[in-house]
Amino acid sequence: MKKIVICCIILFTGLCGCILDLNDFFDYQNNVSSEILVPIDLNSFERSEELGNEVKNQEINEIDEYYIRTYVWNYNGDEWSWDLKIPKSAFEYYSNKPHNREDNYAQYALSDYDKTYLNYMVQSFKEVSKQKNYSDYDTVLFIISFVQSLEYASDDVTTGYDEYPRYPIETLVNIGGDCEDTSILAAALLNELGYDVVLLELPRHMAIGIRGGKGIYGTYYQYNGNNYYYLETTGKNWDIGEIPEEYFGKNAIVRPLIQIPRMHMEFYAQKIGQDRFYEYYNVRCNIEHIGSGIAKDLKLDIYATKLENVENYMWTSYQTLNLGDYSEGSTLEVETVLKIPKNTRTKIYCTLYGENIKEIEISTKEFYT
């Protein structure tokens, strides 16, 4: 068995576009334009003893900025070793994001922030596959064998939660996770490579499905008229279409990889003055895009409502602010002043809405001016 070392440093670099072609085995996503990074120098995959000193020096020079992780796995008669450097800033970004267990887990595979990192990994796999003359089928299994080699660790042991979905960068730094985490990572990598993949939610388990064409056999799930062949991401040596016995014949929820923007908003209101007829309130809204993709055409309504009448009445200080489009991770602070008539029972509201987000409305408690 040969041992082959891959050295990879994940960094930002320039992008260029390409469109993937169809092949005989898998159906790529239709009309997908994939942003591909300039391939990194993999030193022709020389043996580990020839690269050992270089890798060690890189670890010493970059240790304050990077997590250094080594992955070892077997595929097609070769033992592979991959030394990967992951920016600590990326890991901290994802660690600080909400990990909502009620989310559609497909969102964790679709973050825009880690596309650069995943592109580097995909280019590394593609370069190896080209040098080894792997077919498209083997390239998919090569990537899956890497994911399958990661250590299984349940969420209740590592986090104390029954379910704690991780972003791909988190799983890479932790060198493992549970079935949701490895499925999210595998889906993100294959999606970045251009394959049409979905997440498969089975009873107390998760895997991925890859859209198959001619020449693919085994267990598959139908979705929108297409066959998505089962791919196990935990354990080793699982083939495409091969499903563990305990899940054979079980129904699965198919989760397509679709970006869903999601906003978080907090607001504060404070009295700052008054005159003979009005009280004046400073209103500050803090908004953050915590989902994936672009939140389009956001608008924010800030207003106070008179509560005595059967039909609510809003004063002329009602304001609508056009905020525009916001990308993942973007934050915004909006501040304005409302004037509210004296001697009135009222509440102050902030309502955020847009073309492709779920509306958020929050308010103060009732108060009397």
Image (cartoon, helix red, strand yellow):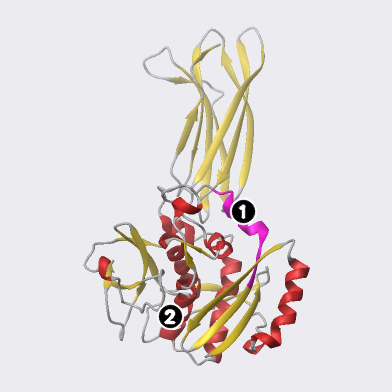
**Residue at 50%, 53% in the rendered image:** 158
Question: Quick check: can you spot residue 164?
Answer: no
Magenta segment includes 95? yes
Q: Position of residue 303 (x, y in %)?
A: 53, 26
The residue indicated by pointer 1 is: 93
Q: Is residue 43 left or right of residue 137?
A: right
Q: Which residues are magenta?
A: 84-97
Residue 134 bears which disc, if any?
Answer: none
Q: Nearer the viewer, mark 1 or mark 2?
A: 2
Q: For numbered disc 1, what is the local secondary structure?
A: helix
Residue kind at label 1, given as amino acid type: Tyr
- Where residue 169 sits in the image (x, y, percent)? 56, 62
Q: Amino acid at mark 2?
A: Leu
Q: Residue 200, image x and y in percent?
A: 34, 63
Residue closer to the observer: 239 or 161: 161
The residue positioned 44% from the left and 57% from the top of the image is 154
Q: Which quarter of the figure has residue 253?
A: bottom left
- Residue 227 position (above or below residue 113): below
The residue pinned by badge 2 equals: 141
- Quadrant where the C terminus sits is top right
Residue depicted at x 57% and y 47%: 324
> Height in image: 298 above or below 94?
above
Local crowd at mark 1 within 10 Å, few (<14), some, or many (≥20)?
A: few
Q: Secondary structure at mark 2?
A: helix
